[in-house]
Image (tube, rainbow, N blue to C red):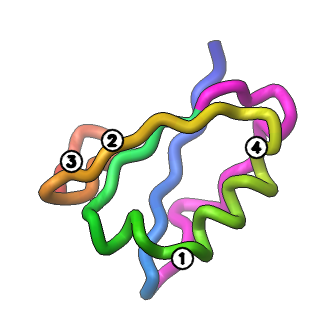
Amino acid sequence: MQIEQSRWSQATGWEPEFPGRLGLEARFVLLFGSPACLKQTRWQDELRGAYPKAHWLGCSTAGEIYGSEVE
């Protein structure tokens, strides 16, 4: 299994880099975010382009989860 992790914010965009290294090989995208963040469409369009064959599963949280941190 290969894993790629990035985070997006409206202020800074993608960190540490734009996702998509796995490209067509990615089959599953797991999302966590605040309700306000999940309503944004820019990152969704970018992820669809980066992982065109992947299925998405996500949920809203009280903060953003990145690595072992919750903000």
Label 3, label 2: how many angstroms apart (C-alpha)?
Answer: 6 Å
Callout 4, which amino acid?
Answer: Tyr
Looking at the image, tell me whether mark 1 or mark 4 is earlier in sequence order: 1
Q: Are marks 3 and 4 in contact (CB under 8 Å)?
A: no
Q: Quadrant of the N terminus?
A: top right
Front residue of this view, candidates 28 and 23:
28
Whole-percent x, y for residue 19 in the image: 67, 53
- Nearest the camera: 36 or 22? 36
Instruction: Report how far apart the C-alphas of labels 3 and 1 lie in the structure.
Output: 18 Å
Q: Nearer the viewer, mark 4 or mark 2?
A: 4
Q: Residue at x 26, y 63 (%)?
A: 34
Q: Mark 2 and mark 1 in contact (Cβ < 8 Å)?
A: no
- The residue to which callout 2 is attached is 67
In magenta, the rendered stretch is: 12-28
Q: Are marks 3 and 2 in contact (CB under 8 Å)?
A: yes
Q: Residues within 10 Å of mark 3 (few under 14, many from 20)?
A: few
Mark 1 lies on residue: 13
- Of residue 16 and residue 52, the one placed in the foreground of this image is 52
Tell me which numbered mark, 4 or 2, is placed earlier along the sequence: 4
Kindly identify the residue that appears in the image at 61 percent across and 28 percent down.
28
Q: Amino acid at mark 2?
A: Gly
Task: Describe the element under mark 3 as helix, strand or loop.
Answer: strand
Residue on which the image places disc 4? 51
